Amino acid sequence: MLRLAIQKSGRLSEDSLQLIRECGISFVSSSYKLKVEASNFPLEILYLRDDDIPGYVQDGVADLGIVGQNVLVEAGGAGLEVEALGFSKCRLSLAVPRGAEYNSVADLEGKNIATSYPKLLGDYLAGQGVRANLHTISGSVEIAPSIGLAEAICDIVSSGSTLLGNGLREVETIFRSEAVLIAAPNLSPEKQELLDQLRFRMQAVRRAQRSKYIVLNAPLAALDAVKALLPGIKSPTVTPLAEEGWVSVQSVVEEDKFWQLAGDLQAIGAEGILVLPIEKRIS
C-alpha cells in the first residue's frame, strides 16, 4: 500500500483530494481523522502540515506527497519531485509599503526583510548581489512593515488582495510555484508499480482538464480547411449529414486555443459548434 501525504486543510488540500477522486479512487474524508484508506486502490492518505510533508517523504515515512514547490524547494527537497500537477499556482514575491520608493531590488541593500522562506529569498538576493537582513517568521508576514520589524516582506501571493489590504505593493516575483507530486527515494518495485499506475491516472485527468471535445457542422467544400484547423489527437472524425453537401466534424482541442479556433471556424462556414468537457483522456 502506498502512503500519500497531503496538506490537512486549505485550498491545496481540497484540490489534492479532488484530483485523487477524479482518478477513480474512493475514500471517506473526515475533519477529525488524520489518515484514511482508499476502498478501491491500495492507497492510504495522511493529513499533515505542509511544511512536514517533504521530510516525511524524504525519510520514507510517507511514500508520496502532494506539496507546493515553494515548500519543497525551501525544505531542500527539490530532488523528490516527480511531476508538476498544474493546480494551486502562486508566486513568491517581494513587497514594500505602498508609499515607499522602490526602483529595483538593489534598493533592498542593507534593509530588513520579513519572510517565511529564507532559503528561497536568500538564494534570490545572492543571485542579485544584494545583502539584506532576513527575519524569519512563520506567519502574518504582511504585518512586519507596519510594526517596524522590516522595510519589506517576501511571501506567497495568489490574488494580491492580502498585500493590498495591508498597505503593501508587490515589486518583484522571485519564484513561481504550483502543486507537485513527490516520491520517496528507493521505493520498492511493488510500490513503484503502484506509483506508475497512480501517475497514469493523474495524467489522464490532467489531459482531460486541458482539452475539450468539439462537434460542428461544416459545408463539404470547407472540409479541408476545417481539418487543417482541427487535427485532433490523430485526425478528426467526419460524418456525412442528411443534408447533402454538409458534414459533421468531431475533434479534440486544447482549451487555451479554443476561442481563437472558434472564430477561425466560423469564418470558414462552420455552424452549430458544440464544446463538451472530457472526463478522462488516456493519450
Image (cartoon, rainbow, N blue to C red):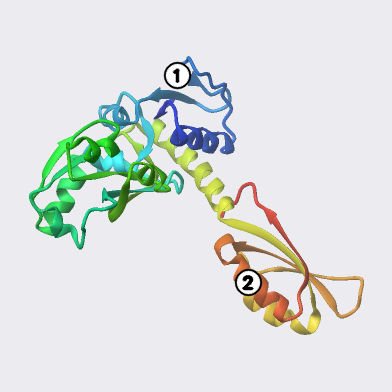
Give, as a three-letter code, the residue at label 2: Leu
The x and y percentages for residue 35 are 45, 19
Image quadrant in which you'd find residue 218: bottom right
**Alpha carbon separation for disc pair 1 and 2:** 46 Å
Can see residue 282?
no
Q: Quadrant of the C terminus?
A: bottom right
Q: Quadrant of the N terminus?
A: top left
Circle 2: is it few (<14), some (14-19), or many (20+) Cα within 10 Å? some
In the image, taking residue 125 as reference, residue 212 lies left or right, namely right
Q: Secondary structure at mark 2?
A: helix
Q: Secondary structure at mark 1?
A: strand
Give, as a three-letter code, the residue at label 1: Lys
The x and y percentages for residue 199 are 46, 42
Q: Are marks 1 and 2 in contact (CB under 8 Å)?
A: no
Please tell me which residue lies in front, 154 or 7. 154
Image quadrant in which you'd find residue 2: top left
The residue that disc 2 covers is: 261
Q: Residue furthest bottom?
A: 221
Quick check: 42 above or below 80? Answer: above
Total of numbered circles in the picture? 2
The residue that disc 1 covers is: 35
Residue at 68 percent of width and 68 percent of height: 236
Residue at 35 percent of width and 38 percent of height: 182
Circle 1: is it few (<14), some (14-19), or many (20+) Cα within 10 Å? some
Quick check: 253 above or below 246? Answer: above
